[in-house]
């Protein structure tokens, strides 16, 4: 019985359900064969099926646009008919609105980089004391939370006052260093991360990166990159230290991601000296943090140890979503830096040295890729695993420095499009805007491939089939970017760039929707 490797990113249904790595061997993968399970795969989609899927996605985009036009409900406490007069003028919205704003915010805490313990934060948020009291979150943090809630609400009655809340959040964030709140540093860090993600969502990368720089400065000044172990020494609770760990790694992830997306310098510790070496352990999953034994969480030279042997550092505490995202962005950052060095290399000696580094980076990337859990069937587009998968596929593409056409880069690009195309869009919230940058970069590979094929003097049957496959993927990606950018000006701008590149290449592509947010940085 012959076996055939499945295309990249297509695990069998048994392995998908269990979120374990699948080798994709048909008709029975190695894991199912070992366990004696019935191994099944989803049927490959034909070109017609893909077109039906694209039309379905376009229909859902129109539903979102119609939803924005729905008449307001009298039962909605945040409807403009039910809002107190001048509710936006005070430092804090009226108490009747706060639970509803908090409910909006709580739906987006994962994609907006919220690292505080949710139960403890909710308790202090709902305390009866006035704005500014030490039993409540700091002024900077509350103002950042309200800004985020307003921006994410999709409610015109709220977003029309967004500039007021932005001005207030920036004012209190600037005052945070002189604040006397007992959690000043931690709350200032959280406020800066929230404000940064607000700017990223709105398409203002320079402003967002500036606030991430401040967040990283706060984190390193308080030595959050030097937490070698979690303990209750010196009266600091375990929960507090776990928050510091998570806060540092969130700042690291956003700094590295948006440095590349914006072409800006990174401010994360570089590990070139003992002082800038990252010793903080990887962040834990929230549910595991509740019952953690402090002595189990240790770190030392975390980044370099991971790069030296990515597959060996996967103890249970190493596989949280955030830890996987930070490992992915570390490899992505190294691949990006390598690409710049390779392009600037002028001598054979320099190229020879870089070739050794290239082999090590490729090996590390593949080893890490083999540890990423597969997506569950119909995973939501907001699943952080999607960003991780797409980022590591783009990392592999960036490490493909062949001067001529590369089949592996095209295969990785097609795998990324299939991955996001298989995701579900329920529009319960905003999609991580960094995904817009990653997909636009993936799209350039597809454009280059279509241009190559159409420039051939004569086409083989294989070339024609490849052209159809890549053209379908390009259409699918254009529609997916439209869907992802439905409520994100940054991603909408990325889609416009992708469409412009398609037109420059003389390629016609399906470009659903007409979102035209103003271009940010």
Image (tube, helix red, strand yellow):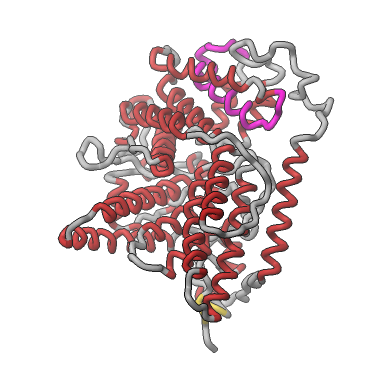
Q: Verify whether residue 63 appears in magenta.
A: no
Residue drawn at x 45%, y 51% is 319
| Drawn side of residue 455 relative to residue 48, left or right | left
Q: Residue 510: x percent and y percent?
A: 65, 56
Part of the protein shown in magenta: 128-157
| Drawn side of residue 347 relative to residue 431, left or right | left
Q: In the current view of this chain or complex, which residue is farthest to the bottom? A: 1
Residue drawn at x 45%, y 42% is 292
| Drawn side of residue 309 relative to residue 379, left or right | left
Residue drawn at x 48%, y 67% is 411
Q: Residue 233: x percent and y percent?
A: 34, 29
Task: Kindly indicate the quadrant of the structure image that contains residue 102.
Answer: top right
Residue drawn at x 45%, y 48% is 325
- The quadrant of the rendering that contains the N terminus is bottom right
Q: Residue 508: x percent and y percent?
A: 61, 59
Q: Verify whether residue 129 appears in magenta.
A: yes
């Amino acid at each position: 019985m012959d076996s055939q490797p499945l295309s990249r990113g297509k695990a069998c249904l048994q392995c998908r359900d269990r979120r374990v790595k699948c080798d994709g061997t048909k008709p029975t993968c190695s894991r199912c064969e070992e366990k004696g399970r019935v191994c099944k795969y989803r049927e490959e989609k034909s070109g017609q099926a893909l077109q039906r899927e694209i039309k379905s996605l376009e229909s859902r985009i129109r539903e979102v646009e119609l939803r924005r036009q729905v008449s307001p409900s009298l039962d909605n406490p945040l409807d403009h008919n039910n809002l107190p007069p001048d509710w936006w003028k005070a430092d804090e919205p009226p108490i009747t609105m706060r639970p509803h704003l908090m409910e909006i915010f709580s739906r987006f805490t994962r994609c907006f980089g919220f690292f505080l313990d949710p139960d403890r934060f909710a308790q202090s948020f709902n305390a009866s004391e006035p704005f500014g009291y030490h039993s409540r979150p700091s002024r900077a943090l509350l103002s950042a939370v309200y800004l985020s809630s307003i921006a994410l609400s999709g409610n015109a009655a709220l977003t029309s006052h967004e500039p007021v809340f932005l001005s207030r959040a920036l004012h209190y964030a600037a005052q945070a260093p002189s604040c006397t709140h007992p959690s000043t540093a931690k709350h200032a860090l959280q406020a800066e991360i929230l404000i940064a993600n607000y700017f990223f969502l709105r398409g203002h990368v320079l402003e967002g990166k500036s606030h991430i720089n401040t967040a990283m400065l706060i984190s390193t000044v308080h030595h959050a990159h030097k937490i070698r172990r979690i303990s209750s020494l010196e009266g600091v609770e375990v929960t507090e230290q776990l928050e510091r760990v998570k806060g540092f790694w969130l700042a690291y992830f956003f700094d590295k991601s948006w440095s590349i997306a914006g072409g800006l310098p990174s401010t994360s510790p570089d590990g070139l000296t003992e002082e800038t070496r990252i010793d903080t352990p990887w962040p834990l999953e929230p549910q595991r943090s509740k019952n953690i034994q402090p002595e189990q969480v240790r770190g030392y030279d975390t980044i370099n140890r991971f790069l030296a042997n990515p597959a060996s550092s996967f103890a249970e505490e190493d596989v949280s979503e955030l830890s996987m995202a930070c490992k992915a962005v570390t490899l992505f950052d190294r691949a990006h830096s390598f690409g710049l060095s390779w392009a600037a290399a002028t001598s054979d000696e320099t190229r020879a040295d870089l070739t050794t580094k290239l082999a090590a980076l490729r090996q590390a990337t593949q080893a890490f890729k083999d540890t990423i859990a597969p997506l569950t069937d119909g995973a939501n587009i907001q699943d952080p695993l999607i960003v991780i998968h797409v980022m590591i596929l783009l990392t592999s593409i960036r490490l493909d420095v062949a001067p001529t056409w590369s089949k592996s880069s095209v295969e990785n690009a097609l795998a990324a499009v299939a991955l996001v195309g298989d995701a579900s869009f329920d529009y319960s919230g905003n999609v991580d805007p960094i995904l817009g940058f990653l997909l636009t970069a993936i799209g350039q590979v597809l454009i280059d491939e279509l241009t190559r094929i159409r420039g051939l003097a004569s086409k083989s049957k294989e070339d024609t089939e490849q052209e159809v496959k890549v053209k379908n993927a390009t259409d699918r990606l254009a529609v997916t970017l439209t869907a992802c950018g439905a409520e994100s000006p940054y991603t909408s701008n990325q889609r416009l760039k992708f469409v412009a590149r398609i037109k420059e290449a003389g390629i016609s592509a399906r470009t659903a929707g007409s979102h035209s947010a103003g271009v940010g940085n």
